Amino acid sequence: MRRNALAWIGLAITLVFFSYAAYVTRDGPTSELTAFGATLLYVTIAVGLVVMVQAALRAYHAGNRWWAALCIFCWPAAYIYALAIDRPDA
């Protein structure tokens, strides 16, 4: 758990952001994003980039070049690799 703590935190922040965005746009499309929403968006992007780099480096050092490339070009794959494939107990 400790090794993948950043990935779990990143996934939680991402889910909070998407839940907030769904709540804000519940009455239809809108361009209204509060300061809280903008801050949450930037934090989500920053944590997502860190998880992508971390997962790609772990995959590269483990010899999984395809997973490393997939983690870089597809952000959900980074969470899949960090949480499901590169587990310390496996």
Image: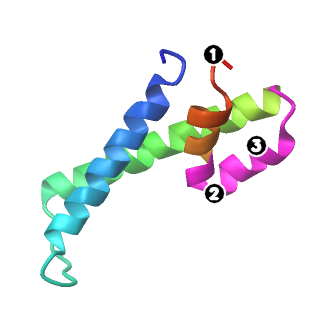
Q: Residues within 10 Å of mark 3 (few under 14, many from 20)?
A: many
Span of residues in magenta: 62-77
Query: Along the horizontal axis of the image, is 2 left or right of 25?
Result: right
Q: Please, what secondary structure does the residue beneath circle 3 have?
A: helix
Q: Quadrant of residue 67?
A: top right
Main secondary structure found in the magenta portion: helix
Name which of mark 3 and mark 1 comes first in the sequence: 3
Q: Are marks 3 and 1 in contact (CB under 8 Å)?
A: no
Q: Residue at x 67, y 34 (%)?
A: 85
Q: Residue at x 12, y 81 (%)?
A: 27
Q: Residue at x 72, y 52 (%)?
A: 70
Q: Residues within 10 Å of mark 1 (few under 14, many from 20)?
A: few
Residue 66 against residue 2 in the figure, above or below = below
Q: For the residues marked 2 and 3, what is the alpha-carbon distance in whole angstroms?
A: 10 Å
Query: Along the horizontal axis of the image, is 16 left or right of 24?
Result: right
Q: Quadrant of the C terminus?
A: top right
**Residue that label 2 marks:** 74
Horizontal and vertical percent position of residue 84: 60, 35
